[in-house]
């Protein structure tokens, strides 16, 4: 790892520090500041010529600020003559705008992909994309990791007696099926009807959850409406406990308060998106070792596929 440099923007410095601790490397020296009018200024304080550079920056809230910061950092390194630049984006913002589902709307996930490549990214390392096909928006290599190994290891340690994995909507079925297979549990599905982007009504449950410890599996929680409605349906149908797991705790608006009062036994999230503190019933697991191992394998040109599930 001697020819490797790891840098971070301001979006999630604690995660970057954990990754560097796992790899036994110091964070690269870089100054990211603001001019008086809010413009972002970047100054790289190390020689990056001929180095394998990794830039850690999730595009979480404030999304536009963190995305612009990442683009400027990429441009600064592109002009510093490194051997390769890898953008490590644990949470890929704008991923929910991945298709033209109504007339006259943008495909913003593709726009962000174009911006990252134009700014200088030569490889992308990301985790649990909201839509896996976003990998195809890039004309550069993309390593798409999953937080499932970390979450499944934690769930197994709880020694649940009668678990059942629940997909909170049809789009989560594939992820939920993989979880169910790994923990040897049955699968249930909540039929979700969405009136508008921020309003959800769960109307039907497919599967028997009576006297079961239900585990709702999703890639992200934003407003919390989907999880709250799914929890309500599960408890009404006899679930003894409800656990929730997600990779990206976006938790916008009053989502934290809403989820804390929904009757959920435990909400398992990861640190792809930073939060100063989360109350009970939240549990935060770290994906630093998973990302760190991927960074090491990319640098050493060895297989990353064994980290996938």
Image: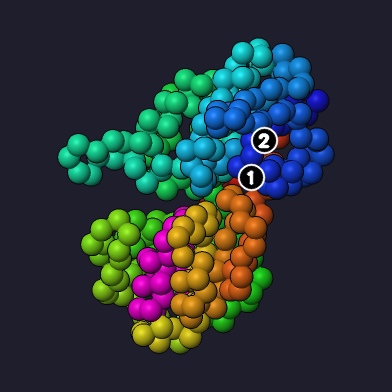
Label 1 environment density (alpha carbons within 10 Å; few <14, some 14–19, many ≥20): many
Q: Report the residue marked by disc 2.
A: 8
Residue at horizontal 41 percent and vertical 43 percent from the top: 95
Magenta range is: 213-234
> Quick check: marks 1 and 2 in contact, CB under 8 Å?
yes
**Can residue 6 be seen here?**
yes
Q: Report the residue marked by disc 1.
A: 12
Q: Is residue 45 left or right of residue 223?
A: right
Q: CA distance from mark 1 to mark 2?
A: 8 Å
Q: Secondary structure at mark 1?
A: loop
**Can residue 122 be seen here?**
no
Residue 226 in the image, given as x and y percentages of width and height: 37, 66
In the displayed structure, 181 sits above or below 42; it is: below
Residue 165 in the image, given as x and y percentages of width and height: 45, 69
In the displayed structure, 84 sits above or below 272; it is: above
Residue 295 in which image quadrant: top right
Residue at horizontal 35 percent and vertical 36 percent from the top: 108
Is residue 29 found inside the magenta-colored segment of the image? no
Residue 56 in the image, given as x and y percentages of width and height: 63, 36
Q: Secondary structure at mark 2?
A: strand
Residue 275 in the image, given as x and y percentages of width and height: 61, 56
**The N terminus, quarter of image:** top right
Q: Nearer the viewer, residue 258 or 245?
A: 258
Residue at horizontal 34 percent and vertical 41 percent from the top: 98
Q: Residue furthest left?
A: 103
């Amino acid at each position: 790892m001697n020819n490797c440099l790891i840098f971070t923007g301001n979006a999630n410095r604690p995660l970057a520090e954990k990754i560097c601790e796992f790899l036994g490397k110091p964070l690269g020296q870089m100054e990211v500041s603001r001019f008086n009018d809010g413009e972002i200024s970047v100054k790289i304080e190390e020689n990056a010529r001929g180095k394998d550079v990794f830039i850690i920056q999730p595009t979480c809230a404030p999304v536009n600020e963190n995305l612009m910061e990442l683009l400027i950092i990429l441009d600064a390194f592109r002009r510093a003559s490194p051997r390769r630049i890898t953008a490590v984006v644990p949470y890929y913002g704008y991923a929910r705008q991945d298709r033209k589902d109504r007339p006259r709307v943008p495909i913003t996930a593709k726009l962000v992909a174009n911006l990252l490549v134009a700014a200088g990214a030569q490889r992308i390392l990301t985790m649990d994309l909201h839509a896996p096909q976003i990998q195809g928006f890039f004309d550069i290599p993309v390593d798409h990791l999953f937080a499932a190994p970390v979450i499944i290891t934690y769930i197994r340690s709880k020694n649940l007696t009668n678990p059942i994995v629940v997909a909170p909507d049809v789009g989560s079925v594939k992820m939920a099926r993989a979880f169910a297979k790994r923990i040897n549990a049955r699968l249930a599905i909540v039929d979700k009807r969405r009136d508008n982007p921020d309003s959800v009504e769960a109307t039907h449950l497919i599967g028997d959850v009576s006297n079961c410890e239900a585990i709702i599996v999703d890639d992200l929680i934003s407003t919390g409406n989907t999880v709250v409605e799914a929890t309500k349906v599960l408890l009404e149908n006899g679930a003894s406990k409800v656990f929730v797991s997600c990779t990206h705790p976006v938790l916008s608006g009053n989502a934290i308060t809403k989820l804390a009062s929904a009757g959920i036994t435990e909400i398992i999230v990861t640190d792809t998106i930073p939060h100063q503190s989360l109350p009970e019933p939240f549990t935060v697991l770290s994906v630093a070792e998973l990302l760190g191992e991927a960074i090491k394998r990319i640098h050493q040109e060895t297989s990353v596929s064994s980290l996938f599930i």
